[in-house]
Image (tube, rainbow, N blue to C red):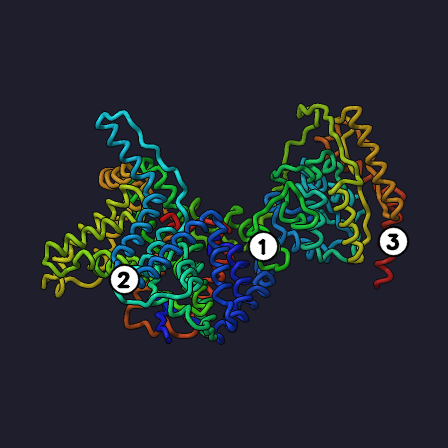
Amino acid sequence: MKHSFIFSSNSIKLSWKNWVIVAALLSVIFCFIPRLWSILEKFDTPRDYRLPYILSNDYWLFNRWCKRASVQYPIFIMGDSVIWGQYVKREDTLSHYLNELAGKGISANMGVDGIHPAAMAGLVKYYGKPISNKGVILHLNPLWMSSKKHDLRGEEEFRFNHPRLVPLLFPRLACYRPSLTERIGILAERSTPFFSWINHIKMNYFDNMAIQNWTIQNPYKNPLKAITLKTPIPENKPKSKPITWFERGMRRQDFPWVKIEESFQWSSFKKMIKILNSRNNKVFVLLGPFNPYILTEESLNRYNIMRSRMERWFRENAISYYSVPDLPSKYYADASHTLKEGYSKIAEELLKNESFQKWLESLKEESKNER
Amino acid sequence: MLFHTWHFLIFFLIVYLIYLPLRKTKFWLHWLLVASYFFYGWWNPLYLLLIVYSTALDYFVVLWMERSPKKKFWLTISITNNLLLLGFFKYGDFVTTNLNILLFRLGVPFTIPAPGVLLPVGISFYTFQSMSYTIDFYRGNIKREPSFIRFATFVSLFSQLVAGPIERARNLLPQLTGRPKIFKENITDGLSLFFVGLFKKVALADYLALYVDKVYAAPALFDGLSLILATFAFGWQIYFDFSGYTDMARGTARMLGFNLMLNFNNPYLADSLGDFWKRWHISLSTWFKDYVYIPLGGNRRGKFNTYKNMFLTMVISGLWHGAAWTFVIWGFLHAVGRFLTRELERTEFYVERVPKLVKQLFTFTFVTFTWIFFRAESLGDATLIIKRVFTTGLKDPNLPLLMLVLIFSIWLYQFLYESRVKSFLKLVPVRVGVILFILLYLIMFTTSGDEAFIYFQF
């Protein structure tokens, strides 16, 4: 029996050929819009540039900064807000002091606020592809291994930084339970720059909101006018008040610390080194700084054991590293961040460090060979 | 499992990929039934007991009706059973609450315990669909369906199970007989319908809900203009929500090789209330016409009886939508409106002199006004909203301009569709452009919320 079919109350009916046209146009848009955007959108990266703090979750911009920095700098300094410079201006960061002492711009500040090793491994894997044939100073902040919770091995679900970068399925993280919709969104974002570009648009122009929610907050603003085609230059001031940890009223902590053999953050860090090495980068690990004065005696003992095990692993695997020695108490702003004096001191000591010098030499050699 | 979620997409892909080769074998119907029951059981596996019971009873009622001279008796069993199911699950709390209020006012020291059961999703839809089969058989309009599997698939087909369209046995059952034929058009049409529906739901209805929910959650905090605009927005929200769902239902069914009936036909272009009901939730209004209005006598016994029947049908239709006085009043208002305008529409002045656009705006305004009762949380809220509309000022409503732009763009599209420039909308660049816009808008601007469809609650 033949059944008549009233299509709809509109004319939006496409044939096979029409759908092919739609698919082709969508593919073109997917491929070229993010690239075109990189040309159209103003992106100033002045000296000692660091990503705007409010755009810490904008991985498309991170990728763009990677591409830009890979042309300008031979060395990338990667890490969390310690590298970014939470308590200092951008001319007081570690990358700045290294550049100053070297007499030229050798290193780029690739610090991202709140990025723990598990997330940084994801960041490098999915958005850090331009980092290849470079020298990478990889900062390891031991704070991420100070407890099971920081190590993302807690059983209870909780909100942590950069969830869109951690593994979605393996290993299974009990503390991270995204919905199926979220998982698919994350997968799409990791695999297609178009989707991370959409996030960039939301973060950069719409206060990190979907445009619909943004219009509820700004009912009479034209969303198109909000797109100014400019990436904000980060304000050149410390994100947090630059005072010492004791002026801040911080008390001694009894961090339990985790065993590195069981640590998820540590295994993620090792994975990240592997990824960077596979892209022909030369990795140098910067272990610390960490404020020993903030720890109770027992906690400090446990921390030292953990640190020595990490150092042993670096030695055993022929990975150049520098374990930041204890700085004067007044140089620390909290458990892991230092004030500008701290960065200056670390840069100074680092340049004197034999292992670092050798690593620099090997970079120069490689660079010569390439030429 | 909502149509606009990834769960459904994955479910549909699996079902479809197995269905395509299976449709050439005798097991395709079994597969469709399993898929439909899985889809329904996803909400709550216990619901399956209810749908299987309802299906089995109506199947056997018709079997007994065929074999017995007491046809009316078996029909009464079917109707009573379906109405009792609906009554218990949907109206149980409403009836007991109202009875308890009455008992309290009469000073009777007794409280009837409320059933307190959860309303099974889609019960209003599949019971009506199943009932139409028994009534049509009783009337001799259709033959008995010998296969239980086929009948069960007719009642539970996942595309239209939870919110319609309420299909008639004479339309859908024959399509389930014989192996389904799937041509290229089934897939292309299905995709077009699905994406348009998805856009209506996710990009429009859920967006409008952001404003409507805020205002209707606390109407006392908002002034007249905000309340008017929220009601206006709700009128479009419910249209986009329900017609979006229907489009997706029709789209998936089309891909499976079935043609479901048109349920919405640009209702806000209606130039009278009668016309509105021919365009809005067509499967329900024709159901009420065929199984309530006409059996009551329709327009056969004079003006008074015609209006009485119309009135009863509208009030019952209101009550079908929800167990609350606000829905009864909504139906009542439509009945009154229909009563008043039917006479007006017959005057020469109205027919000849009043421009169509004015009639359309008049109808739209009336329908929008009645939505206040449909949307308000309570009767108190509804009266408060009407009072505030007329007594408070016109403070800045903070309605996003983008919402208005989207609503008026769609309205304009519909006007064009029903005008002489319709052929312009059929041009390939226009159609391709619209779909491209829809897809990009969905990808770029919508959130990944899993807002349920409004009509699921009915």
x then y, percent, for residue B375: 32, 45
Element class at badge 2: helix
In front of the other: label 3 or label 2? 2
> Measuring 37% from the left and 37% from the top, which residue is drawn there?
B115
Q: Position of residue A9 (x, y in %)?
A: 34, 66
Mark-to-mark CA distance, 2 and 1: 50 Å
Depth check, front residue: B406 or B450: B450
**Residue kind at label 1, given as amino acid type:** Ile
Image check: A131 left or right of B332? right
Residue A362 is marked as 3
Can you say whether A26 is above or below A335 in the image?
below
Q: Amino acid at mark 2?
A: Tyr
Amino acid at the residue labelled 3: Ser
Is the residue at mark 1 from the same chain as the one at mark 3?
Answer: yes
- Read off the residue under disc 2: B138
Q: Chain of mark 3?
A: A
Judge left or right: residue A344 versus residue B75.
Answer: right
Q: CA distance from mark 3 to mark 2?
A: 92 Å
Residue A27: x percent and y percent?
56, 67
Instruction: Using the rendered image, report if marks 2 and 1 lie on a common chain.
Output: no
| Image quadrant in which you'd find residue A101 | top right
Mark-to-mark CA distance, 1 and 3 = 42 Å
> In the structure shown, which secondary structural element does the residue marked by tag 3 occupy?
helix
- In the rendering, at what x and y percent does residue B184 appear? 48, 75
Residue in the picture at 21% in, 48% down: B333
Q: Which residue is mark 1?
A: A184
| Disc 3 and disc 2 in contact, CB within 8 angstroms | no
- Residue lying at the far front in this picture: please name it: B68
Q: Residue at x 61, y 50 (%)?
A: A58
